[in-house]
Image (spheres, rainbow, N blue to C red):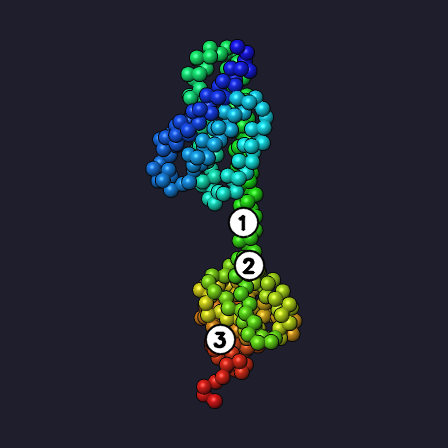
Amino acid sequence: MTAETSTQKVGSYILEQASEIAQSTYERQRHDLDEADFTNETKLSLTNTTYLVKLIGKSLQQNTTNAMTAIEEFGEESGELVQDENEMIISLIVTVPLIREAIWEAIEPIVEELNMKPRDVIKLPGKIDPLLDQFVYSYGSTYITSNQQLKTKYDSTLEELSTPIIPIIKNLAILPLVGNIDTYRATLIMEKTLEHTRKLQLNHMIIDLSGVVTMDTMVAKHLFDITEALSLMGVQVTLTGISPSISISAVQLGIDLHKLTIKSSLHNALTDLAVLSNPAT
């Protein structure tokens, strides 16, 4: 019996025992992970683990490198489906090493039965480990790439939501700001506001601050810089809903509020611009 034939028989045995090896991996995970992690985190499923083990068995059975390509593709498909970083870490750091352990424990009987020579047994890791390593690489790298693409899409959406410029009538739009505004968001608001103002060809912008919770002095400076920049573009700016904290920041910055058009509410601003009818008239 040649070493190659022995390897093929080990591969056939792994194929036959794939479900049991996957179940053994599952039980090892249950033992190694806290109950909360095991319950809440989606690991490689039994079906996926079984399929991965079968690919390894088929590679040994057929003595072919085709399984490497199949495992690479399977790793990429699995990585694309991962939505959570913890899931990815548990799959790579916990599950894959346990699959390795389960395979070696499972093939002990067939290795003894075949009476494989030590040098032939030593060659087995050189055939099995690269396959698992390829899965880890494909799985992890695909997850990272997909996650970066998702982050780019998320950042783009966040940018649009951070500057929700709403055209009301021709040449007039409202910029309603909501939530906390930090320095990064303030810079983003300025960039997007000036960009949208040019595209929409606005000559009047209402910036409503009634939904802003907090704003420190530096951010307030960015905000008033926006009004200055818009003015330089020939756009008349009306500020509405200024809170006491924003007023205090403006005073601390030495900004002359009398030079700005300020209304107590968005409704009042729209009424004064004849966008809304004034019930009092």
- Disc 3 marks a residue whose amino acid type is Leu
Q: Which mark is residue 181?
A: none
Residue 122 in picture, x, y percent from top left: 52, 16
Disc 2 to disc 1: CB gap under 8 Å: no
- Disc 1 marks a residue whose amino acid type is Leu
Q: Earlier in the sequence, mark 3 or mark 2?
A: 2
Disc 3 to disc 2: CB gap under 8 Å: no
Decide: few, some or many residues near mark 2? Use Cα within 10 Å; few <14, some 14-19, many ≥20.
some
Q: Residue at x 55, y 74 (%)?
A: 168
Residue 38 in picture, x, y percent from top left: 37, 37
Q: Residue at x 57, y 21 (%)?
A: 63
Q: Is residue 250 visible?
A: no
Q: Nearer the viewer, mark 1 or mark 3?
A: 1
Splitting the image into 4 quarters, where does residue 109 fall?
top left
SS label for mark 1: helix
SS label for mark 2: helix
Q: Nearer the viewer, residue 218 or 55?
A: 55
Decide: few, some or many residues near mark 3? Use Cα within 10 Å; few <14, some 14-19, many ≥20.
many
Q: Which mark is residue 266?
A: 3
Residue 167 in picture, x, y percent from top left: 56, 72
Q: Nearer the viewer, residue 218 or 242?
A: 242
Q: Nearer the viewer, residue 10 or 247?
A: 10
Q: Residue at x 65, y 68 (%)?
A: 198
Q: Earlier in the sequence, mark 1 or mark 3?
A: 1
Residue farthest bottom in this picture: 281
SS label for mark 3: helix
Q: Which mark is residue 150?
A: 1
Q: Which mark is residue 159?
A: 2
Residue 231 in picture, x, y percent from top left: 62, 73
Q: Is residue 146 above or below residue 133?
A: below
Alpha carbon distance from label 3 to label 2:
23 Å
